[in-house]
Image (cartoon, rainbow, N blue to C red):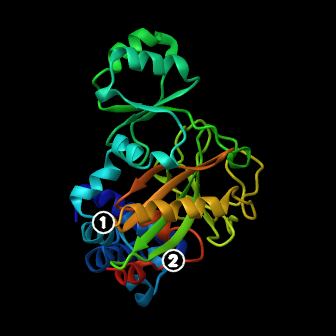
Amino acid sequence: MDLKKLPAWKETARSVSRLTGHAPFCHFCDLLRCYLRYGCDEVQYGEGGFYRLSRAERNNTYTKQRAYALSPRFNPEDTSRLCKRKEAFNRFFSSCIRRPWLYCGEASVAEIRRFIEEQPRVIVKRAKAMQGEGVAELDKSAGAVALASQLAGEDVLLERWIDQHPDMAFGGNAVNTIRVTTVRNPQGNVRLLKAVLRCGVGGAIVDNFTQGGVVYPVDLETGVIEAGGTRKRSVAEGPILIHPGTDIRMPGHQIPFWPETLAMIREAAARIPDLRLIGWDVAITPGGPELVEGNTRPGPALLEYVGKKKGFYQEILSYL
């Protein structure tokens, strides 16, 4: 246990205690037991509802430490670089990516200037960042020439802002994406485990759960949002039916191009046989789906925190 997290553990125990009526000390001890036995951290214990689970359910729950342990067994480090480097990912999956992009680490000042001038809105991404960190809209007020000189040689990507389908806009600034987690056995059979919709809130330009976004469960067969969502929040907050800051009721909403989205994900998973546990992020544009990125260590939040279907650990293990 990281002693720096002791205050967070205590606060989680107190928060859960207010819901259950049990003493905070009891929940603190249970959290410690869950950490040691199941690899559950304080966030999953509280916000992820781990405190409510039976022993059998805990044995079958995908946790942070289990994710760390399984990731290298499914995804070798040398091949994982394909997803960890954004420019490598964009090159490899170019057939699934429509948006123009440019890697500044290999581009000249003139190429960067031209890209900035030609695209109406430009997103800057650190080439190795995760969970929405380091993503920002390029401020063009300094001028294309000055910006190009600053960015040349930097380990960042420039991408044209994705124009999302009107049915994927929910009142915020973010491009809202679908996360579909896939697992593949050594024989090449691909299983789609779960789909969720990630929505940004307010002025945020990213939709990540870790950056304040709301996550809604999506029925894999139909592409319909099947229940209220969740976000990084107090453990006392219930399912979010109305998207924050809007009057949009989310359950029952149909994701456009759903068959095409699943077909693209299956095709992408089939192209990288050495990477067998991937969380795919997909944007839905007016012309169809396109890949945003692939995650070689999909965390427990998008699998276990939201929706009715949970308990993926044993199923994932069966694909080793």
The residue positioned 32% from the left and 57% from the top of the image is 7
Residue 69: give x, y in percent of width and height. Answer: 26, 70
* Nearer to me, 234 or 171: 171
Residue 263: give x, y in percent of width and height. Answer: 57, 63
Q: Which mark is residue 310?
A: 2
* Nearer to me, 215 or 320: 320
Q: Is residue 236 visible?
A: no
Residue under circle 1? 274
- Which part of the image, by quadrant, shows the C terminus? bottom left
The residue positioned 35% from the left and 60% from the top of the image is 296
Disc 2 marks a residue whose amino acid type is Lys
* Nearer to me, 191 or 306: 191
Label 2: which secondary element = loop
Disc 1 marks a residue whose amino acid type is Asp
Q: Is residue 271 above or below residue 40?
A: above
Q: CA distance from mark 2 to mark 1?
A: 26 Å
Q: Earlier in the sequence, mark 2 or mark 1?
A: 1
In the displayed orientation, state which residue is furthest to the bottom: 56
Quarter residue 85 falls in? top left
Task: Decide: few, some or many residues near mark 1? Use Cα within 10 Å; few <14, some 14-19, many ≥20.
Answer: some
Task: Decide: few, some or many residues near mark 2? Use Cα within 10 Å; few <14, some 14-19, many ≥20.
Answer: some
Left or right relative to 221: residue 92: left
The residue positioned 50% from the left and 33% from the top of the image is 100
Label 1: which secondary element = loop
Residue 14: give x, y in percent of width and height. Answer: 43, 66
Left or right relative to 225: residue 128: left
Left or right relative to 73: residue 135: right
Quarter residue 128 falls in? top left
